[in-house]
Image: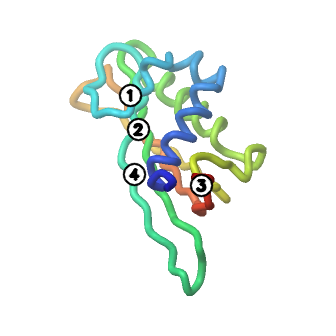
Amino acid sequence: MSLDAVLALTKMVAERLLASPEFIALCPPERFVDSYTKPDAGPLVQIGNGDWTPPDHNETWHHKVFLDLDVWTRGEDNAVLCRQIAGAIYRTLSGATWAPWRGDGWIVHGLSVSVTSDRDTSEPALSHATVVLDAIMQEVATDA
């Protein structure tokens, strides 16, 4: 039995980001978390909401998977650092150099990455960006 599509994508994304020198230079590995932690000092990247739609077997065998990564920065130059981290995530996960991407009983056939950023006006020292992942995935047979 393979992992749930969102969990499989989460695991593949984490492995790729934590192997990226550009990403870990901006966000230490211990600050990349799969929890709803309140952002404190320093950069924080949280695995956020995930959702998927099952395939319509009359037309396709592909699952549509959505995953958010929330980027939080606090302190001086927080907006710049927030955008730099979001850009590093985009560059690490975008492009065809990794396609197709395999892991845990799934193949990622395509991945779109988009970024939105905003600043919390009630707390000027805090910046936030959301990196939205939209993947086309297919479950494959695994050896038992």
Residue 111 in view in this figure: no
Q: Is 95 on the left-hand or right-hand side of 60?
A: right
Residue 50: mark in rendering: 4
In front of the other: 137 or 22: 137
Residue 51 % position (x, y): 39, 57
The three-letter code of the residue at mark 2 reads Ile
Q: Which of marks 4 and 3 is in front?
A: 3
Whichever of labels 3 and 2 marks the residue nearer the N terminus, that label is 2
Residue 114 % position (x, y): 54, 49
Q: How far apart are marks 4 and 3 (CA)?
A: 16 Å
Q: Is residue 65 above or below residue 132?
A: below
Q: Is residue 143 above or below residue 81?
A: below
Residue 128 % position (x, y): 38, 33
10 Å crowding of disc 3: few (<14), some (14-19), many (20+): many
Residue that sits furthest to the left in the current view: 122
Q: Quarter of the image holding residue 89?
A: top right
Where does label 1 land, which residue?
72
Where does label 3 land, which residue?
106
Where does label 2 land, which residue?
47
Q: Is residue 52 above or below residue 82?
A: below
Residue 94 in view in this figure: yes
Residue that sits furthest to the front in the current view: 144
